[in-house]
Image: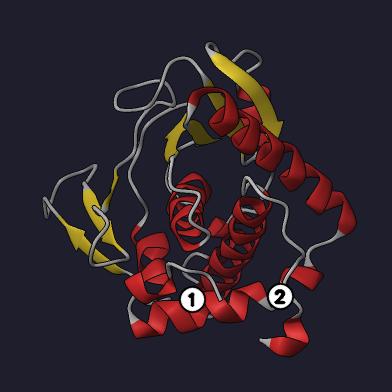
Amino acid sequence: MNESSGQFNKNLNAYLQAIVAEFENIPATRRLELQTIADYVRQQILNSGNAKLTFICTHNSRRSHLCQVWAQIAAAYWNVTTVETFSGGTEATAFNPRAVAALQRCGLVITQLDHGATNSHYHVTFADNIPPIHCFSKIFDAPPNPNRGYCAVMTCTEADQACPVVIGCDLRAPLRFEDPKVADDTPRESEVYDERSRQVCREMMYLMFHAQSEPHSEPNSTKL
């Protein structure tokens, strides 16, 4: 059990504990990609006391937001407390309501701050004693995102190809996810968004587990 689990609401904490039991489902090649980012986080914290991750996709509407949210939650879960997560796109659109709904179904409390806006701002609350995550769509290097000293995590092929150079990043790391947009307005829409959100959560939890300053043996799913 992590030390910070008591900060989360009951439903979210149960969801995260179940996710930890799924680490064995992450393929070996994917683990290597995640380990590269985890090594960066751990080394940055050792060197400067903090680490910054910016998750980048084309429109900053689905995958990059899911990564930003779950990575910040995972960092809090494993007490990797000096990690800051951000998201952005090669263009700005809006945080897609389907992705918002998928996060809500996991136990997150999400407040829309400006109903009716084209590019709404949201507060994503996951713990009583931690400030909410502020989410809205933006270009990857626009405020409040960092413009130097961060890891650029490329979450889709299109963004990776559209950004041959990500200025200011220490490390550019591909971590591509299938776009749940393929299921929009189909009978499987909620199912596909939930699957993608769960995959992202699982991989961000794995990443932050391995970003801890002290080595830990991976949790044994049979004991969870």
Kindly indicate the quadrant of the structure image that contains residue 171. Answer: top right
Is disc 1 placed on a helix, strand or loop?
A: helix
- Nearer to us in this view, 193 or 6: 6
What type is the residue that disc 1 sits on?
Ser
Q: Please state the horizontal and vertical placement of residue 196, each as a whole percent of the image.
A: 59, 64
What is the total number of numbered labels drawn onto the structure image?
2
Image height check: is 174 above or below 48? below
Q: Please state the horizontal and vertical placement of residue 128, each as a whole percent of the image.
A: 23, 67
Residue at 60% in and 52% down: 208
Is disc 2 placed on a helix, strand or loop?
A: loop
- Residue beneath label 1, please? 190
Q: Marks 2/1: CA distance?
A: 21 Å
Is residue 30 in view from this perspective? yes
Q: Please state the horizontal and vertical placement of residue 150, each as a whole percent of the image.
A: 52, 24
34 lies left or right of 84? right
- Nearer to us in this view, 135 or 91: 135
Looking at the figure, which quarter contains the C terminus?
Answer: bottom right
Residue count near mark 1 (Cα–Cα under 10 Å), binned few <14, some 14–19, many ≥20: some
58 lies left or right of 153? left
Residue at 75% in and 66% down: 218
105 lies left or right of 221? left
Image height check: is 15 above or below 94? below
Looking at the figure, which quarter contains the N terminus?
Answer: bottom right
- Nearer to us in this view, 142 or 146: 146
What type is the residue that disc 2 sits on?
Glu
Kindly indicate the quadrant of the structure image that contains residue 42. Answer: top right
Earlier residue among tags 2 and 1: 2
